[in-house]
Image: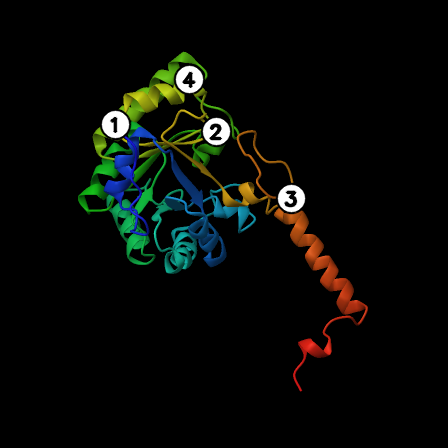
């Protein structure tokens, strides 16, 4: 059954779930401020994710582990002021849902109340079921995240593809079932083999959103800085860069610097009388 887009109406959690068929696939993109939110909205994405990846692409950290709830609120609130149609999901950062169920619910509520978001996302499998159920009991929708979970980078020993061994693949399939049973409305599958992503997608009744998980998921997500080439350096294998913004913008800045130093800026037209 084809999805019939309802124009400019806001994408809700139930509407997102109805896209399980992946026809057409769901499109999710990260955003971290007014400018990136405006790009995502203008581009027509279905969902904006304020990821804790902001720690790396916006705040300059080596990984996501230094990101706080206050960081997430600061950036997600900016996105929330701009978004018009897309579903808005905010990552729960490391340690915001690990210490106690009560603290997890309180942090999730802050992320909703102080940003205007529609849902939160957290990482992990069956070990997170109790936390997910408690957050859902507070009437807050939850998205799951399996596979390469960046908040587990220290335990994993780096950003490595997960689920290549049969035992780990079976565990991820079981975790996906546990997340669905707990009540998540969707789940990100990151950094896992295509066959495993396809298997999980077929096994669950909620949309799967792939990043480094092949084309068989119900949707795809990328980090906007990777998509647009906003930062220098190598990007992961699963990224396709649609622009080289860093090079183009650096050239623009360099041209302006040269104009100022040569006395070509500002001109009379750019000055007040």
Q: Earlier in the sequence, mark 1 or mark 3?
A: 1
Residue 62 in view of the camera = no
Circles 2 and 1: CB distance less than 8 Å?
no
Circles 3 and 4: CB distance less than 8 Å?
no
Which residue is disc 3 drawn over?
Answer: 232
Which residue is disc 2 drawn over?
Answer: 212
Q: CA distance from mark 4 to mark 1?
A: 18 Å
Circles 1 and 3: CB distance less than 8 Å?
no
Farthest residue in the right direction? 262
Q: Measuring 79% from the left and 72% from the top, which residue is drawn there?
A: 263
Which residue is disc 1 drawn over?
Answer: 205
Q: CA distance from mark 4 to mark 2?
A: 12 Å
Q: Earlier in the sequence, mark 4 or mark 2?
A: 4
Which residue is disc 4 drawn over?
Answer: 195
Circles 4 and 2: CB distance less than 8 Å?
no
Q: Quadrant of the C terminus?
A: bottom right
């Amino acid at each position: 059954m084809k999805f019939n887009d309802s124009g400019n109406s806001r994408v809700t959690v139930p509407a997102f779930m109805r896209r399980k068929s992946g026809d057409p696939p769901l499109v999710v993109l990260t955003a971290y401020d007014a400018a990136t939110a405006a790009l995502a909205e203008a581009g027509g994405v279905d969902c904006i994710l304020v990821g804790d990846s902001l720690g790396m692409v916006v705040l300059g950290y080596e990984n996501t582990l230094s990101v706080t709830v206050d960081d997430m609120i600061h950036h997600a609130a900016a996105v929330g002021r701009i978004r018009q149609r897309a579903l808005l999901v905010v990552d729960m950062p490391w340690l915001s849902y690990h210490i106690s169920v009560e603290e997890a619910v309180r942090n999730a509520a802050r992320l909703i109340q102080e940003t205007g978001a529609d849902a939160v996302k957290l990482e992990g499998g069956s070990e997170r079921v109790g936390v997910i159920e408690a957050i859902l009991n507070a009437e807050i929708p939850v998205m799951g995240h399996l596979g390469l979970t960046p908040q587990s980078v220290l335990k994993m020993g780096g950003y490595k593809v997960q689920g290549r061994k049969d035992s780990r693949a079976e565990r991820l399939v079981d975790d996906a079932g546990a997340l669905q049973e707990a009540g998540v409305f969707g789940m990100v599958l990151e950094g896992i083999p295509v066959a495993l992503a396809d298997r999980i997608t077929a096994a669950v009744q909620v949309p799967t959103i792939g990043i480094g998980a092949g084309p068989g998921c119900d949707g795809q997500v990328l980090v906007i800085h990777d998509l647009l080439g906003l930062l220098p350096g190598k990007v992961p294998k699963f990224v396709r860069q649609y622009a080289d913004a860093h090079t183009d913008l650096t050239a623009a800045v360099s041209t302006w610097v040269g104009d100022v130093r040569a006395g070509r800026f500002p001109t009379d037209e750019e000055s007040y009388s």
